[in-house]
Image: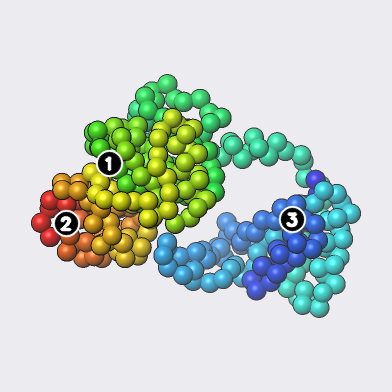
Amino acid sequence: MHELVLRVSEMLVDPVSDALIDELGALAVSVEDAQADSDAEQPIFGEPGLPAPRAGWAQSTVRALFDNAAGATRAATLLLAQDWAADDVHVESLGTVPDEDWVRVTQSQFAPVEITPTFWIVPSWHEAPVAAQKVIRLDPGLAFGTGTHPTTRMCLRWIARHAQPWPRVLDYGCGSGILAIGAALHGATAIDAVDIDRAAVESARANGQANGVALNAGLPHTAQGTYDLVLANILAKPLMLLAPLLAAHLASGASLVLAGILERQADELRAAYRPWCVLDVADDLDGWVLMTTAKGGSP
């Protein structure tokens, strides 16, 4: 395996990356801040739901992998021959990289995640911890929700702490189906898991089967009637827009569990749901909050 390392200015990162993959035969391309771990390092991503403050780093390190030295050399030569690359694309290195078991390297990045001392999320290639009494088997995939994000962990922690035989549960914006599976492991019986993304629906269905859980996974119109527990781990703005819909799905005395909310957004969520129920912060982790309510709470 051979690696071509380039330093590329902000506006050319996307064109160069696209050219490497689409036209120059690169097997993979990665981009990182050329000033990472220095005083000049700058974040370029904003908070969830807000636009990024800038399109990219002022200078990026672009790494491209090739099958052989000839391919890497040809790619560097063709890129540097372009008029637009003269001052903005520079070759930092060109050489061999050791072969790796990339599957094993990738898997090593995903360890079991503790929700409670007895409730864990465990990738299929790991042994479950000895203390684990309830386990969700889940591998990283296309759909959101592997259990590592604070919002997912708080939702699962709430489910574990309030376990009961919920007759009907709705997981709205289900992603991988992880919350629906968690509810099933803690007493839920009839579970609807819905998402606007068809890939997420298929992922939730497959993950449910892998965990021996029966989920009715589908698009949002699949959700019908009222539920004893409604879960929605999305983001604050969509949750506010969905307030009338989610509130309409609450049975009398039902629990509503909302996540994807930053601490500073809690008051906005309270105001959005006030016509139907009273929301309160039930948990917080790493700047995120979990908000819950019972429909019986007076607005």
Gap between marks 3 and 1 measured at Cα? 50 Å
Where is mark 3, residue-wise?
64
Given residues 155 and 116, the one toward you in this image is 155
Residue at screen point 39% across, 55% down:
220
Q: Is residue 49 above or below residue 122?
A: below
Q: Label 1 amino acid?
A: Arg
Please identify the quadrant where the C terminus is shown: bottom left
Q: Secondary structure at mark 1?
A: strand
Location of residue 272 by image quarter = bottom left
Q: Secondary structure at mark 3?
A: strand
Location of residue 32 by image quarter = bottom right
Q: Is residue 113 above or below residue 84?
A: above
Where is mark 2, residue-wise?
278
Residue at screen point 25% across, 37% down:
166
Q: Label 2 amino acid?
A: Val
Residue at screen point 41% across, 65% down:
49
Q: Are marks 1 and 2 in contact (CB under 8 Å)?
A: no
**How far across and how far down the image is residue 77, in percent?**
86, 65
Gap between marks 2 and 3 measured at Cα? 52 Å
**Which label was assigned to residue 116?**
none
What sort of colour scheme is used for the picture? rainbow
Looking at the image, residue 248 sits to the left or right of residue 233; the answer is left
Q: Are marks 2 and 3 in contact (CB under 8 Å)?
A: no
Where is mark 1, residue-wise?
168
Given residues 92 and 245, the one toward you in this image is 245
Given residues 93 and 68, the one toward you in this image is 68
Whether residue 17 is visible, yes or no, is: yes
Looking at the image, residue 66 sits to the left or right of residue 48; the answer is right
Report the mark closest to the observer, 3 or 1.
1
Looking at the image, residue 295 sits to the left or right of residue 150; the answer is left
Report the mark closest to the observer, 2 or 3.
2
